[in-house]
Image: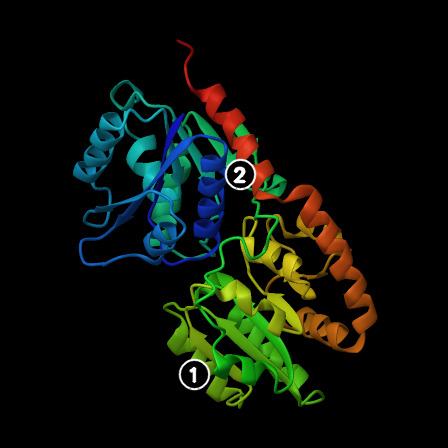
Amino acid sequence: MKILHIIDSGGLYGAEIVLLNLVAEQVKQGMKPIIASIGDPCCGEKPLEVEARRRGLRVEAFRMRPGPNIAGAFELLRFARREEVDILHSHGYKGNILFGLMPKFFRRIPLVSTLHGWTWTGGWDRMRLYEWLDRLSLRFIDRVVVVNGAMREKVKLKRLHVVNNGIPADATDAKNATDPIDPAIAAFCNGGFTIGAIGRLSPEKGFNILLEALREVADSKPEVRLVILGEGDERGTLEAQIKRLGLEGRVMMPGYLPDARYYLPLFRVFALSSLTEGLPIVILEAMQSGVPILATKVGGIPEVLNNGEAGILREPGSCKTLTEGIMECIDSPETAGQRVEVARQRLTEHYSSQVMAEKYQEIYLSAVPPF
């Protein structure tokens, strides 16, 4: 079976890592996956494309102007037909809108979509419009997949499947041994009790609330510091907040790192302060690395962390409860260690990339019309 995975990626974050893990497992299954990487004409080579090629996975770059580009959709469809693709698999609103709203009699190839999570957190902006179009397109997609059970409440569809995100059993499976840990980041982390966070610098990640919580903790715990690995439009806002709170020297934001997960063992706590999520792959990577986890109760996170048995859970958007969670991590190391062991066991049993790929194969077979 040949699958064309369609994605317009903005870096090498959760959805991209899930896709790479899935494609690698599909190759092992004897399938023929191709990644169609969408981007605007001036974007250059994307991190996803670089990493896919490094892993020996087939990736094809498609460059088109932003927005609902009909010509770009036809180009992708012509490629799929030339390659005799059996399944189109969309990862994100771009592919959903381009192909979900395309008449089925013209598209002809079955379309599967994975919803990795919506990022809109309020107000009226371009993202709100895209998510509205995304929801509309889902009505016309052959199979829709959500990455955790909690998302069922947001997606009211009959053709809905749940497939948990997964990561390889071997943590070093895709590691490039020539990529060292940045010594400056390592030195910062070793200089005190370091809280680590990984993700795009965008409003839905709640990093502003994490900074407020750090300010509260810093008065009584002067050894506490924070590293945020990621890049995005909120950098200027967050840097201004750090200065306003007097946290210079306590916070490090080194930017986007393609192998951010390999920094997890340097952290004393991994913090996820998001206001909305699906099932973030970085949570699974933190569980695998053995670092204690503090996370908000959003999306599939409570299920993954077994309602608090595998990590501390706190309400989203609350500086107070996030502060309490950080203090608990510092003051109760034995309890944190117990949660780490539960997390590792849950990861092995429920969140492997092999199980993820097997479930997708079943969904593909149900969508392909019989001969």
Image height check: is 172 above or below 348?
below
Q: Residue at x 31, y 21 (%)?
A: 104
Q: Residue 5 is drawn in which quadrant?
A: top left
Q: Residue 149 is drawn in which quadrant?
A: top right
| Secondary structure category for the residue under label 1 | helix
- Contact between marks 2 and 1 (CB within 8 A): the answer is no
Q: Is residue 146 visible?
A: yes
Judging by the rendered image, the residue that carries numbered circle 1 is 240
Q: Position of residue 4 (x, y in %)?
A: 35, 34
For the residue marked with disc 1, what is the amino acid? Answer: Ala
Q: Residue at x 38, y 40 (%)?
A: 134
In the image, taking residue 268 as reference, residue 42 lies left or right, namely left
Image height check: is 152 above or below 259?
above
Q: Residues within 10 Å of mark 2 (few under 14, many from 20)?
A: many
Judging by the rendered image, the residue that carries numbered circle 2 is 146
Q: Residue 328 is drawn in which quadrant?
A: bottom right
Q: Position of residue 344 (x, y in %)?
A: 71, 54
In the image, taking residue 334 as reference, residue 42 lies left or right, namely left
Q: Residue at x 77, y 67 (%)?
A: 336
Query: Real-space Cα distance between discs 2 and 1?
Result: 36 Å
In the image, taking residue 314 as reference, residue 199 lies left or right, namely left
| Secondary structure category for the residue under label 2 | strand
| Mark positioned earlier in the residue sequence (2 or 1) | 2
Please name the colour scheme applied to the rendered image: rainbow
The outermost residue toward the front is 177
In the image, taking residue 44 as reference, residue 279 lies left or right, namely right
Q: Is residue 159 visible?
A: no
Q: Position of residue 346 (x, y in %)?
A: 72, 48
Image height check: is 125 above or below 116?
below
For the residue marked with disc 2, what is the amino acid? Answer: Val
Q: Residue at x 44, y 64 (%)?
A: 200
The outermost residue toward the top is 371
